[in-house]
Amino acid sequence: MVTVRLPYVRRKRGLLFWEPTRAMRARGFLPKPLGPEGDVSIAEARRLYGAWKQLLSEGEKVSAWPAGSLGHFYDAMRRTAAWQKKALRTRQDYERAWRHLGELAPRTLTRISVDDVERLADALEARAGAHERYRTVKCLRAMLADASFRLQLAGWANPAKGIRNPQPVGRSAIWLGAEVAQLIAAARAMGPPREGMALAIAVAWETLFAPIDVWTLTRAELKRDVGGAFLEHARTKTGKLAYGALTAATDIAILLYLRSLPFAVPPEGALLRRHTGAAWISKDTFGDDFREVRLAAFGSGERRQFQDLRRSGNVEADAAGADKATMAQLLANTLDRSAFLDETYTPPTVAKARQVANLRLEGRKRLAVELTRARSK
């Protein structure tokens, strides 16, 4: 038998396996056993390769999935104007969920049952945990609702709508002020290349910005007025404007850091950078770099994360009696029960950010006595 050369196909013991690249998988082309080598398996391999080539030539006009399937709709959904208007973090949530939806992707939408979704949710929780299950089912539920609306699937009930999908208990760990100082000192002790992470910790602690809002800061967003330095940043998740007050010490440290770099950072360039000099481009590399600093500061037994800095700062301010509405606005969440009205009538200001910073100093003094208790948990 003459062996036919097929792109992205592996042969093993007379069987053919479709093995797309990582870039192809991100576009919906998932690994697939094709069966014994023969006319049928070769034809399927050529069909898949043809679909990939067509996708490259026509952009997003085609799909690797059968017409009417969940995968086909997902490809179409990402071409809509509504998808482009979604926040970056929302689109990333869908893409993260999609990695877990492979078994449902080729299924015809109207043939996905409640049992199918329940089995997927149970298997996902067992394999990846409650948080992945919650996020994935939440995205699947929204995706199927959008499919029902866009495709006008009359008489079809969303199979993910009624299944139980409890939200996992949120994190509760906090860092104390003295411990944050230890983290910053540990980063600086690792040498000048780690100054970017040392400043990222300091900025997050002083501004209560989310991790992604820290590592996406640009030099142009560092500003000053008669009251000192502050950051003016459009939040990555919502696009809403946020302000963060900086201490004089952090302001000076940032200026010295920028001067120490072997290149000039343009206004649109990343303010803080990795030890390599490159900007952080993902939460994974940012988290990896923080874990190295945490290990140096507290050893392998410590599990608290960079994201816990936001909660810790709020606890400080709350201990000093900070107004709930003010904190909800600064953190861009719903700490108070009327966050919508509060946001409508009292937009964020630099003065408010500095007010919270002063309150936190008092809260830090009160919480310092709990250092031993917090470490014992």
Image: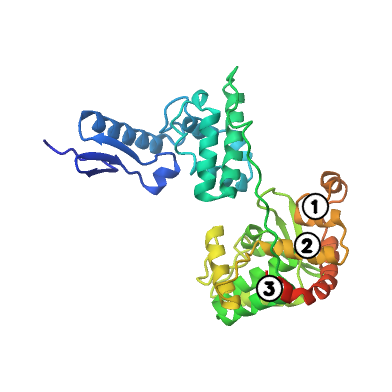
Query: Residue under circle 1?
Result: 335
Relative horizontal placement of residue 19, taking residue 178 as reference (left or right): left
Badge 2 crowding class, 10 Å Cα cut-off, few under 14, some 14 to 19, many 20 or more, is: many
State how the image is colored. rainbow
Task: Check if mark 1's residue and mark 3's residue have beta carbons within 8 Å.
Answer: no
Q: Which of the two discs, 1 and 3, labels the residue nearer the N terminus?
A: 1
Q: Quadrant of residue 178?
A: bottom right
Tell me if I can see residue 110 in this picture.
yes
Where disc 3 sits, the SS reads helix
The quarter of the picture where residue 210 lies is bottom right
Q: Quadrant of the C terminus?
A: bottom right
Q: Position of residue 292 (x, y in %)?
A: 54, 72
Q: Earlier in the sequence, mark 2 or mark 3?
A: 2
Residue drawn at the location 61% of the way across and 62% of the way down: 215
Q: Residue at x 29, y 41 (%)?
A: 17
Kindly check if marks 1 and 2 are in contact, taking CB atoms under 8 A apart as contact: yes
User: Can you give x and y, in whole percent of width and height, for residue 177 in the image?
Assistant: 74, 73
Compared with residue 123, is residue 219 higher up or lower down, i.e. above or below? below
| Residue that badge 2 annotates | 314
Label 1 sits on a secondary structure element that is: loop
Asked whether 232 or 39 is in front, the reply is: 39
Q: Secondary structure at mark 2?
A: helix
Can you see residue 231?
no
Q: How many marks?
A: 3
Give the number of the disc on residue 375: 3
Q: Is residue 190 left or right of residue 58?
A: right
